[in-house]
Amino acid sequence: MSASPTAIAPEVITEDERKQIDEQMASYPVIDLAGYLNQTSGFDVQCKEIAQLLHRFGLLIVKDPRVDDKLNSNFLDMMEQYYDQPVETRNEDARPELHYQTGVTPEEIEKARNHCTRIKGLNSAEKPLTECPPEKDHKSRFFWRIGPVPENSDKKNLNPHVVPKAFPQWTATMNGWGEKILETVKTVSEMAALGFNLPANTFTSKMNCAPHLLAPTGSNLKEHGKLNTVFAGYHYDLNFLTIHGKSRFSGLYVWTRENKKMLVKVPDGCLLLQAGKQFEWMTGGYVLAGFHEVVVNEAAVKAAEAAAAAGRSLWRISSTLFGHIASDENLEPVAHFKNEPRANEYPAITAYDQVMGELKAISLAQ
């Protein structure tokens, strides 16, 4: 295993700049989905707000009354136990022949795309800590498919379930959490469509039997807990919508459409969603895939010290699900998004081909 990347001086972002960024995120709106779910008066206004937030920030924070935070806690507990196993044991769950799209992806396999040209264009306060060119990520990940497979497709065997031997509760826990937050993804997708003046099913009709992947990422603060270590390099997600439950350690930074860097702070009981490349594709660039990175910041260092003192796990788990467009569906700008200025940059392509292209670019597929 290679050494941790050289830490970048924290003065890249001044205290005043950090305070300003933190204040922005602290005032970020939280959308309560109850109004739409109950069809109460005013939900159309929330749909418009979701559409505008996705356009401007590529980011949403929502509260879904159907999602019990205890499911997230149980999920995080189990994943901490999973990652606390010896590396050799975890590696038995790897499936490189399936491009690591099921089971575990060991540390330092995935490497973020090279976005160095883009990074050079950012001012010092907005630059990520990711090195150029990027190192392989100091993170491991487990993929678990949520929802049915497409019976009449040659893509149905791409994500078979891998069940770790030591966890009899694995399937119930993974499905219990994953199915709940996938419903949140679908609800937000409907609300976004309505906010864009499109039929509610514009996006969700293309998500049936898609390879939605529950993807808990494990980053070891015991081994790589030095301030400013990069766990996940500066990147965007390749899928449609990504959703996260609240992590037990800070460290997720996101960039807005205007390339403003923000530290994400998710309130208790809430969920974070980010637009991925498939969303960008279908809106002709009106919604951009949100850039983000995960690093060891001061808050994570302090939380790790407290966890160590209390005898708790030092694995940072991201409670993540990647919501996808179905593999055989075409990606292309829909409806009025065909008239976006950049729409011709998004030619028709199957979601499968788009995903495979991205997997090759991040070293998961040959």
Image: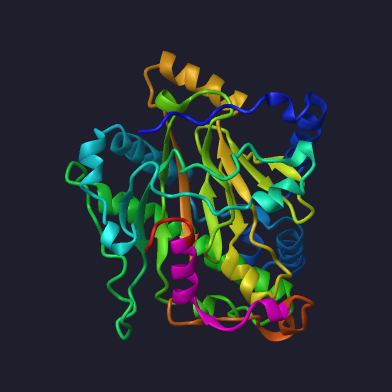
Q: Main secondary structure of the magenta part?
A: helix
- Residue 30 in view, yes or no: no
Q: What residue do we see at 47% from left, 49% from top?
A: 111
* Location of residue 304 with respect to 59 vertically, above or below: above
* Location of residue 160 with respect to 283 vertically, above or below: above
Image quarter hosting the C terminus: bottom left
Q: What residue do we see at 77% from left, 66% from top?
A: 45
The residue sitting at the left extreme is: 165
Scheme of image coloration:
rainbow
Q: What residue do we see at 33% from left, 83% from top?
A: 153
The residue sitting at the top extreme is: 309
Report the span colored magenta: 343-360
Q: In terms of image quadrants, where is residue 337?
A: bottom right
Question: Does residue 315 show up magenta in the picture?
Answer: no
Image quarter hosting the N terminus: top left
Q: In terms of image quadrants, where is residue 143?
A: bottom left
- Residue 251 in view, yes or no: yes
Q: Position of residue 338 (x, y in %)?
A: 72, 84
Q: Position of residue 97 (x, y in %)?
A: 27, 62
Q: Position of residue 37 (x, y in %)?
A: 59, 66
Q: Position of residue 93 (x, y in %)?
A: 24, 49
Is 81 placed left or right of 356 in the picture? left
Question: Does residue 347 show up magenta in the picture?
Answer: yes
